[in-house]
Amino acid sequence: MRLEVFADKKKTFLLAFTSLLLLACMYFLITDQRIQMQILGWLGICTFTFGFFNLLKQLFSSGPLIVIDYQGINDKRTRMGVISWDDILSISVGEIRGVKLISIRSSNPQKYLNKVSFFTSFASSFNKSLGFSEITISPTCLTHSTDQILLFIKKTGFLR
């Protein structure tokens, strides 16, 4: 059994467009006289630019972004590689502002985190500070929901 999860092109486009609008707003903040607004504007520009380019890459991707099969879970967006079922201790769901995240607790998270970019590593640390495990899967702009992905994992019996 195999589950392939693709980008939802419509949702991805709308979120990328929203990121562009927020970038425009951030530009106005950096032109403000107050230093606090300028700092906020530059932080926003960095954040939304990174998000926009990731969404743009996702928008034009043709293959699956997440593959779950007998080998493990591969969220290609993070570039961690396949997280082997043997390394997965548990899978749970957490929620941040109405968005459900899949939290994967691994016996050796550094094995996977050593492969990721600075931004993914930063996001991983941030997720951990919020009470999640270091490895999370976000269903944002995907063709399958968190519940559908978890149901597939439960049905297959891959996780022991």
Image: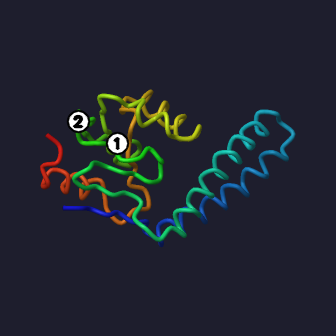
**Which of these two is toward me, 21 or 49?**
49
**Which of these two is toward me, 50 or 31?**
50
Q: Amino acid at mark 1?
A: Glu
Density class for disc 1 (Cα within 10 Å; few <14, some 14-19, many ≥20) is few
Residue 1's place in the image compared with 159, above or below, is below
* The N terminus lies in quadrant: bottom left
**Callout count:** 2
- From the top left corner, tell me how far across and down residue 75 is, in percent: 40, 51
Q: Nearer the viewer, mark 2 or mark 1?
A: 2
* The C terminus lies in quadrant: top left
- Residue 36 found in image quarter: top right
Residue 120's place in the image compared with 50, above or below, is above
User: Is 34 on the left or on the right of 156, as rendered?
Assistant: right
> Which residue appears at 25% of the width and 39% of the height?
92
Q: Amino acid at mark 2?
A: Ser
Density class for disc 2 (Cα within 10 Å; few <14, some 14-19, many ≥20) is some
Q: Which residue is disc 2 drawn over?
A: 90
Q: Which mark is residue 133?
A: none
Counting residues from the N terminus, which is met first, the one under dot 2 or under dot 1?
A: 2
Secondary structure under the numbered disc 1 in the rendered image: strand
> Which residue appears at 51% of the width and 38% of the height?
123
Secondary structure under the numbered disc 2 in the rendered image: strand
User: Is 46 on the left or on the right of 68, as rendered?
Assistant: right
Residue 28's place in the image compared with 38, above or below, is below
- From the top left corner, tell me how far across and down residue 127 is, in percent: 44, 34
Q: Which residue is disc 1 drawn over?
A: 95
- From the top left corner, tell me how far across and down residue 118 is, in percent: 59, 37
Per the model, the C-alpha gap separating discs 2 and 1 is 17 Å
Q: Are marks 2 and 1 in contact (CB under 8 Å)?
A: no
> Which residue appears at 82% of the width and 33% of the height?
35
> Which residue appears at 34% of the width and 63% of the height?
5
